Amino acid sequence: MKLTVRPKRGWRRVTFKIPDETMERIGELCERYDFRVEEAVRIVLLHGYLEDDSSANEETFERLKEEISRLEKELYELEGKWSPLKFRSYYIAMDNQNLAIQLSAMIAENKRLRERLGLPKGDYSEVEEKIHYYLNFKG
């Protein structure tokens, strides 16, 4: 069987010739240990399990399956911690935008009142930079 692997980016391809007996054996092992064939081939190619290792037996596959299970649990735990942080940061960003809009209106009112009262113009450049930052304006 020929297996062609392409990167996510770019045009290069690598083609492997895998004997049919080996693919059948991979298929049997995948069925027995509940892996997808594509996933097993990816693991073999990425992690260098191509050597003819006499210790690559059912214990090894069980250990790899347990490691994958442990990593999936860890992934779900991290996802559980990350989701509330993402949610909070979104609402904090929205609050910052609302405050920037209000501050912009107050600066405009202050400028107008200073002009009417004949007071010197104030320097709001630092505050305006912050407003532009929170409203995602360029320049």
Image (cartoon, helix red, strand yellow):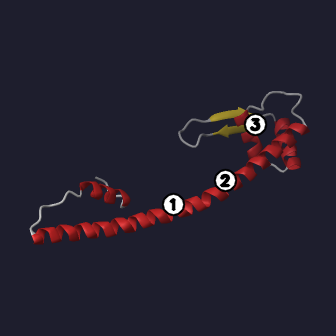
Residue 138 visible to the viewer: yes
User: Helix, strand or loop at disc 3?
Assistant: helix
Residue in the picture at 33% in, 56% down: 130
Picture coordinates of residue 7, whole percent (x, y): 59, 40
Left or right: 124 with respect to 60?
A: left
Write down the quadrant of residue 132 in the picture: bottom left
Q: How many residues crowd around disc 1 within 10 Å: few (fewer than 14), some, or many (20 or more)?
A: few
Q: Looking at the rendered structure, which numbered label has been put on residue 57? A: none
Q: Taking 69 as reference, is 118 above or below it?
A: below
| CA distance separating discs 3 and 1 | 39 Å
| CA distance separating discs 1 and 2 | 16 Å
User: Helix, strand or loop at disc 2?
Assistant: helix
Of callouts 3 and 1, the N-terminal one = 3
Q: Nearer the viewer, residue 18 or 101?
A: 101
Amino acid type assigned to the residue bearing label 1 in the image: Ser
Q: Looking at the rendered structure, which numbered label has been put on residue 89? A: 1
Of callouts 2 and 3, the N-terminal one = 3
Write down the quadrant of residue 87 in the picture: bottom right
Picture coordinates of residue 28, whole percent (x, y): 87, 45
Mark 3 highlights which residue? 44
Left or right: 83 with respect to 128?
A: right
Residue in the picture at 50% in, 63% down: 90
Write down the quadrant of residue 110 in the picture: bottom left
Left or right: 52 with respect to 90?
A: right
Mark 2 highlights which residue? 78
User: Helix, strand or loop at disc 1?
Assistant: helix
Picture coordinates of residue 17, whole percent (x, y): 74, 33
Residue 36 visible to the viewer: no
